[in-house]
Image (cartoon, coloured by chain):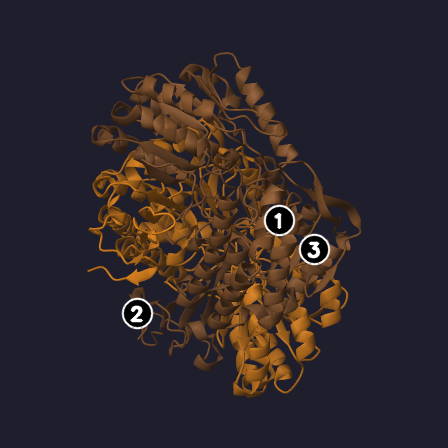
Chain colours: A brown, B orange
Amino acid sequence: MTLTGEMLIGAAARRGSETAFQGFDAASGAALEPSYGGATAADVAKACGLAESAFTPYRATTPEVRATFLELVASKIDALGDALTDRACAETGLPRGRIEGERGRTVGQLRLFAREVREGSWQDVRLDPALPDRKPLPRPDLRMRMIPLGPVGVFGASNFPLAFSVAGGDTASALAAGCPVVVKGHPAHPGTSEMVGRAIQAAVKEAGMPEGVFSLLFGVGDTVGQALVADPHIKAVGFTGSRAGGLALAKIAAARPEPIPVYAEMSSINPVLLLPGALAAQGAALGKAFVGSLTMGAGQFCTNPGLLLAIPGPGLEEFVTAAGAAMGEAAAGVMLHKGILAAYEKGVAKLAGTAGVERLGLGQSGENRATPAFFATDAATFQKTLHLADEVFGAAGLLVRDGDAMALAHLLQGLEGQLTITVHMTEEDEALFAAVLPLLETKAGRILINGWPTGVEVCHAMVHGGPFPATSDSRTTSVGTLAIRRFLRPVCYQNVAEYLLPEAVRDANPQGLWRRIDGVMTQPS
Amino acid sequence: MTLTGEMLIGAAARRGSETAFQGFDAASGAALEPSYGGATAADVAKACGLAESAFTPYRATTPEVRATFLELVASKIDALGDALTDRACAETGLPRGRIEGERGRTVGQLRLFAREVREGSWQDVRLDPALPDRKPLPRPDLRMRMIPLGPVGVFGASNFPLAFSVAGGDTASALAAGCPVVVKGHPAHPGTSEMVGRAIQAAVKEAGMPEGVFSLLFGVGDTVGQALVADPHIKAVGFTGSRAGGLALAKIAAARPEPIPVYAEMSSINPVLLLPGALAAQGAALGKAFVGSLTMGAGQFCTNPGLLLAIPGPGLEEFVTAAGAAMGEAAAGVMLHKGILAAYEKGVAKLAGTAGVERLGLGQSGENRATPAFFATDAATFQKTLHLADEVFGAAGLLVRDGDAMALAHLLQGLEGQLTITVHMTEEDEALFAAVLPLLETKAGRILINGWPTGVEVCHAMVHGGPFPATSDSRTTSVGTLAIRRFLRPVCYQNVAEYLLPEAVRDANPQGLWRRIDGVMTQPS
């Protein structure tokens, strides 16, 4: 595929006339061709208008048609072959194996949502049949199903150029729900975005979907994103990025004449609890494994383990020694772009310069590379120094080591909401784990035992979400099939004749759905 | 029960020291004893702190224990007997039969949520078993369930002193979800509120629930409500009332350091489409029935039919004549309180004084009573006069009569979100109905055929919600069992040992739940 630097607005491709920009080779800093023109306000309005025009016909498609379309998008992305991997590696600095794995996850996610669309329980159908003889009043015939919200604005994230970008989880779940999507591509990987965008555009055409089902806009700065969230046709927003960015979009959405939901996945330091039994049993091994998780992908995972909490005791010293040693061998990492590298270096310098914070280990350094870093402090310093709980995006970890179980619970209580909390434990830690589990549930969307939070499975039971500020809406997840629910709302049909009803709520159940009938879950016959 | 004028804060009852107020006999305007003292900021903080303390033990109760508690609340409200009906009739001016029906709905709702808690599918359990041999990476064991958000602030509504007030749908669904509740009682029915509040307080004690599960605060003005929404322990808000009130609360909630969801049911004019076949078949009967729905309960239903849309043709004149005649016989209505009566009279005067608006009928008048009123206009006037689409809370209806099917769709397209849209039709209107149904779905939470929107069934398939500004969150309903979802969020457990897991997600399935296992809905064995 020859990259053109054009935006994709419905079936058209055209160059934006606002400020031009280019992608960069993250490792070398060299600019990559072509240049991309930014969208004007009129481009945003055009894409959103086309999305609105596509909404009614697109949501009217059968589950089979929509599922087939999602599978076609997956196939077209597969067909991009090595060119996509090459470009994504160059634009992000992420290693080849990682990008290949991420592409597998991305197409797997589209196919999972295709199966979910066919399975159909996301429609949440409920039928309460009429009770004409009920006293004192008869009950009318009532039927409920979920319908899509409308066009969705999606923001590509820089740290997952495929799985959280143009055809990532937000796009896949919105399209699955029946919502057209307008993507604002992340300016750090425009070439990757154009390739994937053209794959979707081709699938839209080949599947005979209305053209407005998908558009891809480019732009540097905030104006394109702001216009997208403010556009009256947009009914929900999906975003993965910084806390400041997510909050800014939420503010715009709330100030609209018609406020809309913003699903922003923003900020998490993903605490790891090192309980006494686990430290005693394998302190050194945990130290080494921690550094592996911390430095993976240059620490640029939303679920990167940035905070360790430990009660002093046997094995903690071994943990620290092993982590320090592993850190010394950890390679300097290419970060996604210069801005992220600069922010990381600033964050690490702030940690290093904080009174009461000690550096336990430092990775290797290199030009235009980030040096992994591992620090420690005590509970009192952590609690009085608010910025120590802020996310430093990258491979920087902080160990808080003192106190007892009570102090640990107190520390946890003071933390903001998180995507994940990990617990390393053995049988002897069970009482402590059981005591803090209810607290962990209120603090995070996912609780892991004896693993590392990096790596998010795309499945039915996954929650990639959590209380504020991990996300702007703790009631949801941005990964896994439950993510479809973000883009749905219920509608009730009262006394509508069978043949005028949507298929999902007809007595005949032509879609073969699981439904609650008079409150009882009922298998399709 | 002797009313004391006290607030109920956990297990305690004490008089508020802020501005005192009294209830009034809505019909006579006479003040009713006792006087109620308003809550201080410290009272709000105390109630919310107790709610927070109660959260962990309350949500840990088994479904059976929680269901039994809800049933006990219902029994205690039943046991209030005629005293409750007498007081509620006096404070609201609503007729005895209406209040008796509303009490039946209120206790029925509590018992329905008790059954829903036991049934358990609201926990939405999903299990994705480990795949240790999967390539390239094994899949961990992942399990998901819904847990409650935390303490919920509930605002009593004036128009349903039982079903949308202290023990109404918001309270019932929040308690069912496992959330403690702090209610701000509506100052128009403090005696009714105290009675119901004491019934809940007694049930909390008798069932051995932690005291903070329920508190009831009083106050005139905005300060108590503002403090409740701003309290850091409160994690969600339920509100039924005016658009201005709902928007003000949403603004406070969004500006918190940790923003929280506000479920505000605010404003709807509940359009009724009179299609040509229905008018031709029974124009006069529809006109009479319309007035019955419009004037029921002095027009103070959230789903009151305030707007009629008709295409001129056979039967429309009969509709107008019959509606005008029925209107002439319609009694003047006692409204809930003086403020609502004044707002109604102002709204009607504004309608009457609008150029292009004609009065078609007027009900009877009486001192301290509202006179039902029925107006008509044309589509052009309606579309250029924005305030004609505003809700006039009370028995005022507006008929828009001209244009064709295309004009009708255009009118609908221009309307804001609604709780309900009603369609009167016969077989000959089917093509028109089918053509506008997708539009109706995007405009309302409930679509009714050949009925009237007043009267909301409490069941599984009900949606009492709708796009903004009908509610602040179209993804939800405030009536029916789906309302429980407003107070839940998902949590995922990764590689947690069976015996350390919450019951709902254990392999053994001790709660007998329907669960999705590897994506497949699975019946409890």
Residue designated by label 1: A87
Residue denoted by label 2: A523
Regarding mark 1 in the picture, which secondary structure is present there? helix
Front residue of this view, candidates B469 and A18: A18
Q: Label 3: how many residues lie within 10 Å, few (<14), some (14-19) or many (20+)? A: some
Q: Residue at x 24, y 28 (%)?
A: A429
Please tell me whether residue B133 is drawn above or below residue B497 in the rendered image. Answer: below
- Residue B267: horizontal and vertical position, in percent? 57, 56
Image position of B363 (left or right of A494):
right
Marks 1 & 3, CB-CB < 8 Å contact: yes
Q: Nearer the viewer, residue B50 or A136?
A: B50
Residue B371 place in picture, x, y as percent: 59, 62
Q: Quadrant of residue B524?
A: bottom left
Query: What residue sits 59% from the left and 47% below the top?
Result: A88
Q: Which residue corresponds to the image point at 32% horizontal and 24% vertical from the top-left?
A: A284
Query: Taking A480 as reference, is A282 above or below it?
Result: above
Q: Name the subunit of mark 1.
A: A
Q: Residues within 10 Å of mark 2 (few under 14, many from 20)?
A: some
Q: Residue A305: where, in percent of width, then height?
A: 44, 32
**Spatial distance from mark 1 to mark 3, Cα to Cα?**
11 Å
Residue identified by numbered label 3 = A3
Q: Quick one: SS at disc 2?
A: loop
